[in-house]
Structure formats: C-alpha cells, structure tokens
Image (cartoon, helix red, strand yellow):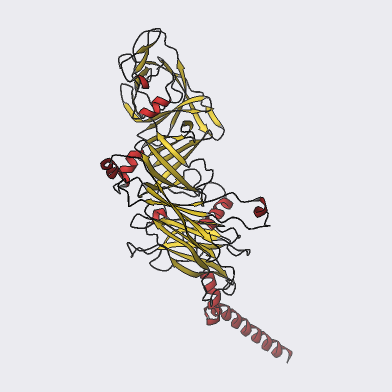
C-alpha cells in the first residue's frame, strides 16, 4: 500500500513538473505578454547616420556609454524615416531625460525636417513617441537644436535653427508646456507651443543678455532675450545694404513680436564682382575665404594673436586664439544671402560641433557669427565673433610695416639648405625641391606667445609639420625679395623697387627646429636644427 502511494505521488510530481516546464516555454508567446514585449521593443537604439570620418570618442566604456546616451535615439524610427540629429534634455524635471529627435523622409526630396518629442511612458515602461512637428528647415546640414531660457521664467525653450530650399535662415522657438503629464498616451494637448517663427534671406541670432544674480539664485525672473534678423534692403540698389529687425517678447500675447527695424548701409562693392561672389555657389565663396584671416579689434586694428585659417581643399578650419590651436573638420557648406553657413566638427572631441555664419563685409573682410555647444552666442562676448581681415592684403601690410616677420604669415623668397631649396609665395604656397623630389603644400608663419612658428601642410598626407623659427642677421651681400619688394643684403638690407608702403626686411639666415604643439604648449622633438640661407638670385 505504501509503495503504491509513493509511486502515485511520484507520478503526480513528475506530471506537474512537465506542466511547469511547458508553461515556461509557452507563456512568453501568450497575449498578456505583449505589453512586456512592446516595452522591450521601445528601447531599441537606432544609430545616427554616419558622417564621413566620424569616430566614437576615445576612452573607456563609461565615456562611450555617455556619448551614445546623448546622441543616439531612444526609440526606433518608422520605415522610411532617416535620423538627422538628437538632442537629449530633461524638459520636465523628473529623474529621466527626454529627447528631441530630428528626422527626414528620403522619399521627400525637398520635404521638411521633422522633430519628435520622446518621453518615458510609466505605463509602458519605456520611451515612446509623443509628438511630431514639421519644421520649415529642408537642408539637413544646417539643422541646429539647442535649449535655453528665452523669456526668463525658467521655462525650457527649444530653438530649431536651419535653412530652407530658398536659402533663407529660419528660427522656430518652441516653449515647453508645464502641464503635460508624464503619460501622454491619451493626451490631445501638444507638449510645446510656438512663441517665435522667423524666416529671412540673411542671418538670425538670439541676443543673450547678462542676467542678474537674483535670477541666477532663483529669486526673480530674468530679462527676456531678443531675436535679431538681418535681411536684404530690397529698396536699395546696393546688394550689401541690410535691414536689421529686432523681435522682443510680448508678455501679453506670450509671443515674439517685431519691435523695431533699422537700415544698415553696406560696403560699396562693384556690383558685378559682388553678384559673381554671392551667386549661390558654395565653392566660389569657399575659394574667396581660402587662407588666413586675422581678427579685427574694436578699435579697427588687427590682432595677430587670433586668426582663423580656412582650408577648403583639405576640408579643415583652424582656429587660433589664447595661445591654443583648435582644428575642426569642415563638414558642410550652405550658401546664404551674404556668404556661407558652415557646420564643422572638432577632430579631437567629436561631440563638439561648431556652426559658422560667414558674411561678406568687403572684398578684404568678412564677419563671423559662431554657434557652439548648443548655444547661440550672438550679442555676447564670444572670442570668435566679429570681423576678420584677410592676410596678405595691401591694407594688412600697411598696418604691419616692421622690420621682422613675426606678424607676417606669408613671404616671397627662396631659402636653401641641406634639405633643399624652399620657395615661399605670397599666396601661402610653398615647395621644397630636394633634388630627387619636390614637396608642395601650404604654409603660414604665426606667433605663439613670444615664439614664432612655421607650419607646413604638405599636399600628400594630413600631418601638420611645425617648426620653431629663428631669424639670423645679414652678414654678406646679396639680394632677396619679400612680398613687399624689399630684401636682405649688404651691411643690413638691400632695398628693391616696389611700393614703399609695403616695405619690410628679410633676414638672410633662417633656422628651423622641429616642435610639436599640444595642450601643454610647445614641445621640443630634439631633432637636428635646419639652417637655411636666403637665395640672392631668387
């Protein structure tokens, strides 16, 4: 009897075990498991469309995870949608960040770029698509998303900036509504409202102002920012004349409204040349800005300690200021009414992007407005905003007439040494003829603190070769010319015929010492110095 009971218990236990195993295999496929599956699906990460040459940031897994969390979408896009950009931001003050995801539909060639508001759904247990909004932007490479407190009440505003197919700058400012609940599945109210929408055939900027300490501490409201738009004066025959329109926030209507307009006369440039330069071709304006540009101080003088070097051939832009050099890859150029809108990316920190509005001031000057770190910096103290004058122009040489090359980027001469004959031209090109081969590229002399340096950019390869420059005194006769028509020779110098307003002296000896520039400054590479002498017959 006991044995029969034991066998019965064993059979029942074995049968129950089979049912449990079968249930574990079947349950994930039952209808009530769909909610869990949907939540898991909503967390699929879709990578950004790769940019040529773009790499993940160096560092450990923590840095890479932080990078992916900032720039990768938290939802999967629908079929036929292509990711353009992602902005990760905490819009509602909860523990989890939300996202603004920009996308376009490749099937719509001239179609707009859309943005999606992505929020965490408590009921779903994952991120979901809440709201779609079509922007007036159609040119993908010009899109810029950033957030700021526009009206001073600490509400988060989303600024969407870019260009449309007509070549107009557009700015749409969306204010986040505070009443939107966390779960927006059955909410008809949109999470944002439009407080400004501007389009102009020129440039647009948000003029930030310094806010009080009381605002910073949260005691009072801040002063609302204004929006400034620059467009062509259609009533003028001069293509460079502009109209400045200022938009201010109206507390009553809760919208940005036109406050005032001002006519700004532009430079008188020969209209045929101006039309050719501003013909709508990015390549023509890139050729115009190719080279070295010095910053112009408020008093109209040049600051040789700050410059920008545009290199369209190698798709690079070099910024030099505060004794530091920053190199950005030139990603995209879009022609504007007065110049170019350029997007660039730091070659060392790939998450750092910089947008430049390059406007023509004259045939020898440009004006820059820089957007960086997802913040517009027009109207505040930004180190790169302002006017720049092209190096090598007659006006530049007249302002810098001195007996040394410490502030002259280009010369016109030939120096010879054991490495061969190096020819420098006023256009910023050099060639090194070693007998067996000829190396060509671009060059520039510049100052880093009290040290003069020479940078060579060979055509072959991407390496930048930097030398510390030492100029020797002239001890013998001979003639060598610089770009201003004066050379070295005799007891001190030999004067050549040329424009006396452009005269300067060229030493007969040049010594180059190989160095490396880094965040620690100038580092010696302990290579043998290269001694060269001025070729009197060149």
Residue 314 visible in the current orientation = no
Where does the image place residue 368, in percent across and percent down from the top left? 44, 43
Q: Is residue 181 above or below residue 437?
A: below
Q: Camera-side residue: 265 or 358?
A: 265
Front residue of 344 and 72: 344
* Closer to the camera in the image, 268 or 170: 268
Residue nearest the observer in this picture, 132 or 462: 132
The residue shown at (38%, 52%) is 231
Q: How far across and how far down the image is residue 465, in percent?
A: 43, 30
**Up-down relation of residue 313 to residue 222 (above or below):** above
The location of residue 297, given as percent across then percent down, is 48, 34
Task: Check the image and report above or below for 78 versus 232.
Answer: below
What is the quadrant of the C terminus in the image? top left
Which residue is the extreme one toward the bottom?
1
Q: Residue at x 63, y 58 (%)?
A: 221
Find residue 279 and report its horizontal and vertical position in percent: 28, 47
The image shows a total of numbered marks equal to: 0
Would residue 385 be seen by someone viewing this image from the given angle?
A: yes
Please state, as top left, top right, bottom left or bottom right, where the N terminus lies in the image.
Answer: bottom right
In this view, 348 is above or below 465: below
Q: Image quadrant of residue 505?
A: top left
Instruction: Please tell me in which quadrant of the rendered image residue 481 appears.
Output: top left
Measuring 43% from the left and 25% from the top, which residue is drawn there?
400
**Residue projecting furthest to the right:** 2
């Amino acid at each position: 009897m006991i044995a029969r009971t034991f066998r019965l218990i064993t059979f029942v236990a074995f049968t129950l075990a089979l049912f449990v195993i079968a249930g574990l295999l079947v349950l994930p496929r039952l209808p009530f498991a769909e909610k869990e599956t949907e939540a898991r699906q909503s967390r699929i990460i879709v990578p950004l469309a790769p940019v040529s040459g773009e790499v993940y940031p160096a560092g450990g897994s923590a840095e890479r995870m932080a990078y992916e969390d900032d720039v990768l979408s938290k939802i999967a896009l629908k079929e036929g949608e292509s990711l353009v950009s992602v902005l990760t931001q905490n819009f509602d003050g909860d523990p989890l960040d939300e996202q603004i995801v920009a996308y376009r539909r490749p099937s719509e060639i001239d179609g707009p770029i859309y943005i999606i508001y992505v929020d965490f759904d408590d009921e779903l247990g994952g991120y979901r698509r809440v709201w779609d909004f079509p922007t007036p932007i159609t040119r993908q490479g010009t899109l810029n998303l950033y957030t700021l407190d526009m009206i001073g009440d600490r509400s988060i505003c989303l600024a969407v900036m870019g260009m449309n197919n007509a070549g107009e700058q557009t700015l749409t400012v969306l204010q986040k509504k505070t009443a939107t609940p966390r779960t927006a599945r059955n909410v008809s109210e949109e999470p944002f409202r439009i407080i400004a929408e501007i389009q102009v055939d020129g440039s647009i900027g948000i003029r930030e102002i310094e806010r009080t300490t009381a605002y910073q501490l949260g005691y009072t409201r801040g002063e609302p920012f204004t929006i400034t738009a620059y467009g062509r004066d259609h009533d003028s025959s001069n293509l460079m004349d502009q109209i400045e329109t200022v938009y201010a926030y109206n507390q009553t209507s809760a919208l940005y409204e036109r406050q005032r307009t001002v006519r700004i006369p532009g430079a008188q440039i020969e209209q045929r040349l101006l039309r050719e330069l501003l013909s709508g071709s990015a390549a023509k304006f890139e050729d115009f800005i190719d080279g070295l540009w010095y910053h112009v101080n408020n008093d109209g003088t040049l600051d040789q300690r700050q410059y920008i070097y545009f290199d369209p051939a190698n798709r690079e832009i070099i910024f030099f200021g505060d004794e530091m050099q920053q190199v950005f890859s030139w990603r995209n150029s879009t022609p504007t009414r007065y110049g170019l809108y350029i997007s660039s990316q730091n070659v060392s920190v790939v998450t750092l992007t910089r947008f430049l509005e390059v406007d023509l001031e004259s045939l020898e000057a440009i004006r820059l407005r820089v957007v960086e770190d997802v913040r517009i910096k027009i109207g505040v103290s930004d180190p790169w905003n302002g006017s720049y004058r092209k190096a090598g122009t007659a006006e530049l040489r007249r302002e810098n007439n001195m007996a040394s090359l410490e502030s002259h980027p280009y010369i016109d001469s030939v120096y010879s040494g054991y490495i061969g004959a190096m020819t420098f031209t006023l256009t910023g090109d050099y060639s090194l003829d070693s007998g067996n081969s000829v190396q060509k590229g671009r060059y520039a002399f510049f100052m880093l603190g009290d040290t003069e340096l020479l940078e060579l950019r060979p055509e072959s390869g991407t390496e930048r070769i930097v030398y510390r420059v030492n100029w020797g005194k002239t001890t013998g006769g001979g003639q060598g010319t610089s770009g201003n028509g004066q050379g070295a020779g005799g007891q001190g110098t030999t004067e050549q015929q040329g424009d006396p307003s452009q005269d300067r002296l060229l030493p007969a000896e040049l010594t180059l010492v190989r160095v490396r520039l880094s965040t620690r400054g100038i580092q010696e590479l302990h290579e043998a110095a290269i001694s060269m002498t001025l070729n009197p017959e060149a």
